[in-house]
Structures are given as C-alpha cells and as structure tokens.
Amino acid sequence: MITLNVGGVYHYTSAHTLLNSGSRYFEKIAKSNSTDEVFIDRDGGVFNIILNYMRQRKLILDLHVTSSFLEFLQEEAKFYKMINLSHAIDEHVKCTEPECI
C-alpha cells in the first residue's frame, strides 16, 4: 500500500494503480520502493477524482460541474502529466455543450 498525502488529505492506493496511471509522475512514486508517505503539494479534494480515474480508467463527474472546476481539474491533470485524463476532461466538456445534450 502507498500512502499519498495530497495537500493534507490522505489517500491510499496500490503500486499497481499508480503504475497503470499512464503518468511518469506516479510511476516514479510507485517504483521508489519507499515505505514513507509521499507528500504532494496539490489540492487533496480534487485528487480523489484523479485517483478514481486511475482505478477505473473512466472519468466520473456530476453532469453539472462548473467550467471553472473543469479548468482546475485540467490543470491538475497537466501537473500530473496524465494525458488520458486530460483527453477525458476535454470529452466531458464537449458533451456538456448545448449541441451535444
């Protein structure tokens, strides 16, 4: 088990989840073999969505999330170098535009 302290919020996951994230950022953490918790100075609340994406390979959001929240989530995806998540956010934005609904 790997303990991630993201902005003071603790998240627990496996090396397998991090290795399959598609992110070199998380692959480095998983391969470090450290038993210490890893502190990441980012938003801990939003990280829950990111971690669930890593586990399920699917972006699950409320249909009515704000555009500013999606922009913030997109910035987090870029920070973690999660290209697939970034694409999933783009697709979510497209499907909430009036012509998609």
Image (cartoon, rainbow, N blue to C red):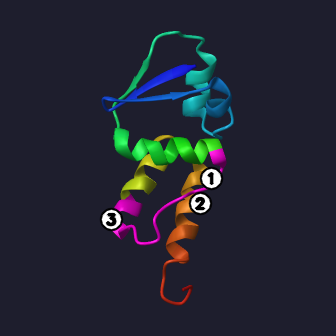
Picture layout, residue 36 above or below residue 66: above
Kindly state the secondary structure of the residue where label 1 is placed.
Answer: helix
Kindly state the secondary structure of the residue where label 2 is placed.
Answer: helix
Q: Which mark is residue 87?
A: 2
For the point 63% across and 55% down, which residue is it? 58
The 10 Å Cα crowd at callout 3, few under 14, some 14 to 19, many 20 or more, is few
Residue 81 shows in this picture: no
Name the kind of residue labelled 2 in the image: His
Residue 22, x across and y down, in percent: 65, 41
Question: Earlier along the polypeptide chain: callout 3 or callout 1?
Answer: 3
Measured Cα–Cα span from mark 3 to mark 1: 20 Å
Q: Nearer the viewer, residue 32 or 63?
A: 63
Measured Cα–Cα span from mark 3 to mark 2: 17 Å
CB contact under 8 Å: marks 2 and 1: yes
Q: Give the residue at mark 3.
A: 68
- Magenta span contains residue 60: yes
Name the kind of residue labelled 3 in the image: Ser
Along the horizontal axis of the image, is 82 left or right of 63? right
Q: Nearer the viewer, residue 47 or 22?
A: 47
Residue 84, x across and y down, in percent: 62, 52
The 10 Å Cα crowd at callout 2, few under 14, some 14 to 19, many 20 or more, is few
Q: Which residues are magenta?
A: 56-71
For the point 49% across and 61% down, which residue is it? 61
Secondary structure mostly seen in the magenta stretch: loop
Q: Give the residue at mark 1.
A: 84
Measured Cα–Cα span from mark 2 to mark 1: 5 Å
Q: Quadrant of the C terminus?
A: bottom right
